Every structure is written in C-alpha cells, then in structure tokens.
Image: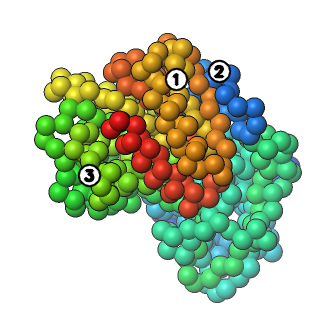
Amino acid sequence: MEWEGGNTTLFHFTILLVNFGTMKYFFSIGLVLPLLLLSCKSSAPSVESKTTTGYQGQPKSPIVPTVDVPVQKQWKGIWASKDSSIFFSNEFDGARLNGLSDDGNYHFTALVTAENTPINGSPWYAFKIWGKEPKDITLKLAYQNSRSRYYPKISKDGVNFRALDSTKFQGVNPGEGKFGLKAAPEFAQMSLRVGADTLWVSAQELYPSKRVFSWMDSLASKPFIKKSVIGHSKEGRPMRLLQIKANPNNKKAILVISRQHPPEVTGFLAMKSFVETLASESEEAKQFRATHDVFVVPLMNPDGVDNGHWRHNMGGVDLNRDWQNFNQPETQSVRNFLKSKEKDGYEFVFGADFHSTWDDIYYPLDTLATGPKGKIVFDWIAAIGERLPQKKTNVKASKDLDPTMVSRTYFFVAHGMPAIVFELGDNTPRPFLNEKGKVAAQELMRLLMN
C-alpha cells in the first residue's frame, strides 16, 4: 500500500501514537507495520574461521522463502517543529525518516523503521534539516527493533559527506563487545547547528541510483566500455550493466556485483575502486583486458537503495537469499545474463560480490568443496594481505554447496566460477577502502594472467 501527502507539519499528518520504550512517538502514514515474516539474518554462510582474532563473521544463513511479502513505502514530506522554525525532510532518493517527536527546547527524536520485519539490524537513515535562522539542536535517533549501527555522516550538498565530529555525538545505553549489533548503543544522539542552508544527515554516504548511473556514464566514455540494461527491478528501475571489453575475441570474463543490500555503501566504494583499476590506463590493466572481459552490475537493488531500505528489495526479500529459487526480478536478470553469455561461449573465471558488515572479512568457498579450482580465491586473499598488512582481514570459508541461495555459491555451482563475498567494514577508513579495491584488482589481474 502506498500513501501520498504534501508538505505539512508533523501534527497534520500523523495517525498513530505508539509507546516506544518510555516515550511516545507520532508515526507518519508511511510507517512500516510489523509483519510476521521469516528471519533474514546475514549475507554469507559460515564454518570455522581461518583466524582467531578480530571480527569472526556472521552465523550461518537461514534458509528462507523469497516469494514476495508486503512492503510499505515510507511517507515522503516535511516535518516542522512546534514553532515552525526547524524543518526535517525525506523528500529525496535514498532518504529514510519515518517519524519525528518535538521534545521541546529544540530537542528532537527521529524514528527510523524498516521496510518490513523481521529484518537484519541495518537501520538506515537519511534526511535533510534546515531552519529559519541559525539554531543549535539536539537530535536523538531511535530505531524499530534495532540499535544504532551507523555513525552519522553529514553534508552540505548531499554528495560530499564527512563523519560527524565525535564531540557532537553521544551513544546512549552503550552495548557490549566489539562487533555486532549487541555492541552498538541503543540510541544515538547528536548536536547539530542548523540554519537556512540545508544540512544532510545520513547513515553512510548517499549513492542513490542516479549517482551510481552517473558514475557508470563517466566510465562508459572510454571506447572499450559499454553500458546495457539486462532487466528491470520490481518497481521498473533498470538493472544496468557495464561491459569492459577491449578485445572482441575475448571469451574469458569476470563478474562483479554490488549493493544487494542498500546500506552497504563501503562495499560499493571498494567495488568502485576495483572496477576503476580494471578499466585504468596502466599497462597491467591493458594487458588484462587483452584476454579478459569484465561485467559489472554495481547496483543490484536499485529499488531498495532509492527507497531507503534497511535490507530488502521492493518484494520484501533479501536478494542474497534468492540465488536458488530466483523469485525476484533482480536476481533473475543476472541469472539470465550469465546463461546468455555462456551460450555465447564465455567462461567466467572469477566472481566478486561486494558487501559491508561490522569489519572487513572474506567469505569464500572452502577448497574442500570447490577442489583446486577454488584455490585462486585463497591465493588472491593472501596476495591482498601481503600488500596491505596494516589491517588484518579474517577469512570465513564455507564448505556448503547446497543450497545455492547466496550469490557466491550459485556462481560456482551453476557456472563453475570461483567466487567470493567480499565484505568491507562499516567504518573502514575511506582512503583504505579505495586502496583495498585497487590492490584487489591488481592482484586478481596478476593471478589470472599468470
């Protein structure tokens, strides 16, 4: 169900008063209602970790249905403070703001809810704030059945973001441990200076579909890079693909995908650097393109990204559980593309699916399952580690080839493609993300050419 509304104050467009802890919140019409769905917890199967320190990864993924379940789109509009001097808006692609409480004395509580429930604890938020005159405000973030995972990023233009000054941030009710949702604070509170110029607040940098497609357009200005559409999402957005092809006789290829889960921007940033390195003018890249093509789907879930979802597509499904049943148009698009290319004689020799989680970790398939063909993945991981020893990255391999519901497993089982889920940390420094993507591309080219 979808509701429409115009610009108004909070009190003109609220219909439900709900107790949330010890406080009461007004919800806008687009509030996601709790639904009794099956749980979708993580993005990779797990067996024993290869290391004993640092982030140990997520538990084994449950098998879940991937048929459509209800999703409610958030109401889009403008909220105003009681004195109509401060305004909040979610009227842009990638926004998420579901309710607002004016607590008095320029203290506000923003409520962030998911597209449906139950859901992985990835509470995405993004909104704009401005005022009639400069004011110092306090803003608290509260979540539906989650804790405060993402450290706030702020921007003056919606494009260039930086982390909020730590002196302006407070975690409320701190969690326990170092990694995972239990380690996160229950709420986040920030101090902000707002005025006539719009201030953007977001869980991560904003890369909605228009910005991703603009990046693709810039790469496609090179004569050996082409764009195409391989399908459409649930809401009809194009599933766009980049093809890097310098030699018309090439029949070996690698596949790269990203953003199955909307908030996982750090994985996208590393993927971006990875692809740019493969498309660069270095001698190594030129030699690689003489023998290998590269196919890239940088935005697997355009609906989820543009609608500000925590995890799912507009079918209400975790796409990285649909690589066996293929109930969703997004996964169908890639499946059909791979089949068509194999009919054309292509051999896919490597696949990488970029994600984000609590810290950098690799999820490959164990060679006990893949045999010698999968060894290149571990050689690649080792080569990256030698180049970047400053950050320890754990490896959590899976021995399971059935079910194939996760992309990496499907790529190998259906297409014989050594593949990996490549996870980057939510808070991994951005310069390091760029360097890791670059080094990963360089080492993969070296291994495949040798």
Frontmost residue, 78 versus 94: 94
Identify which residue, 219 or 65, lies in the foreground: 219
The residue that disc 3 covers is 286
Location of residue 123 with respect to 127 vertically, above or below: above
Q: Amino acid at mark 2?
A: Val
Q: Secondary structure at mark 1?
A: loop
Mark 3 to mark 2: distance in Å?
A: 38 Å
- Please state which amino acid type lies under the numbered disc 1: Leu
Read off the residue under disc 1.
365
Give percent across and percent down for residue 92. 46, 62
Q: Examine the rendering and report whether any part of residue 106 can be seen.
A: yes
User: How packed is label 3: few (under 14 Cα within 10 Å), some, or many (20 or more)?
Assistant: some
Q: Identify the residue at horizontal 64%, vertical 41% (top origin).
A: 393
Q: Residue furthest bottom?
A: 133
- Compared to 132, does 17 lie above or below? above
- Amino acid type of the residue that numbered disc 3 sits on in the rendered structure: Lys
Name which of mark 1 and mark 2 comes first in the sequence: 2
Quadrant for residue 212, please give it: bottom left
- Residue 240 is left or right of residue 371, and the answer is left
Crowding at dot 2, Cα within 10 Å, few <14 / some 14-19 / many 20+, comes out as some
The span from disc 1 to disc 3 (Cα, nearest Å) is: 30 Å
Looking at the rendered structure, the secondary structure element under dot 3 is helix
What is the basis of the colouring in this image?
Answer: rainbow
